[in-house]
Amino acid sequence: MGRAFEYRRASKEKRWDKMSKLFPKLARAITMAAKEGGDDPDTNAKLRAAIATAKAENMPKDNIDKAITRAAGKDADTFTEVNYEGKGPHGVLLYVECATDNNTRTFSNIRTIFNKSGGQLMNSGGLDFLFSRKAVIEFKKPEGMELDEVELELIDHGLEELDAEGNECTVYGDFTDFGRLSKACEDLGLEVTKANLQRIPNNPTEFSEEQIAEIEEVIDKLEDDDDVQSVYTNIA
């Protein structure tokens, strides 16, 4: 009984720790989306996507509303998007997207993580041709509707590919079609659980389990940084 209690407590603490790091990142994404395209999710696809992602992570509605309201405040002006590209352990390519109110701090933190891992930062744009920016939308497999039918409906709205695994479905399209593709999913009544722009490697590379373990340590350190929003790799 004592061990079971300790396990449950450790499990809860792990979830709380994850939320304490994840919720501020989700809130920042919502605030920046609202600042960029307005606070009405009906007319702001990027904001709709940020809200959908936050809800999928069980972020409370009150936190979401506060993040949207914050877009009208002075604090929202201080955040800017900045990306860092580089090579990590075993030559893995790392593309790091950040939202920061202090470029000097963020650059110093990211550079330190790369250097300590034996990697190095590259000039901005150095990895652009090795990654494709895609609109990626995840949803639950719909009841009463065949996936072939969904695919046919979405092709006219920018769908390039549809993957399904169990009850989870993912559609991909060019990043420029993000708005109309996400709206088409909503119009079909699909239960969207996540929608965002991602960087997909054009030539995924195989790594051994030992190498991946070392790479994941670096990714964890990057994701633990408050300013880091997303980390992409060329791992197959």
Image (cartoon, grey):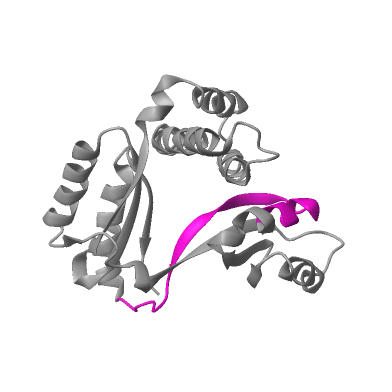
In the displayed structure, does residue 219 sit left or right of residue 120? right
Q: Is residue 112 magenta?
A: no
Which of the pair 33/92 is nearer the observer? Answer: 33
Q: Is residue 197 magenta?
A: yes
Q: Which residue sits at x=42%, y=76%?
A: 202
Q: Height in image: 45 above or below 74?
A: below
Which of the pair 19/50 is nearer the observer? Answer: 50
Task: Give the x, y percent position of residue 143.
Answer: 83, 59
In the displayed structure, does residue 40 sit left or right of residue 7? right
Give the extent of the magenta segment.
Answer: 182-207
Task: Give the x, y percent position of residue 76.
Answer: 43, 28
In the displayed structure, does residue 225 sit left or right of residue 115? right
Q: Height in image: 10 above or below 117?
A: above
Q: Which residue sits at x=50%, y=27%?
A: 71
Q: Tell me if residue 208 can be seen.
A: yes
Q: Height in image: 191 above or below 104?
A: below
In the displayed structure, does residue 189 sit left or right of residue 77? right
Q: Quarter-wise, where is residue 208 in the image?
A: bottom left
Q: Tell me if residue 235 can be seen.
A: no
Q: Height in image: 99 above or below 114?
A: above
Q: Give the number of marks.
A: 0
Task: Give the x, y percent position of residue 146.
Answer: 82, 69
> Could you tell me which quadrant the C terminus lies in?
bottom left
Q: Quarter-wise, where is residue 209 in the image?
A: bottom left
Task: Give the x, y percent position of residue 136.
Answer: 57, 60
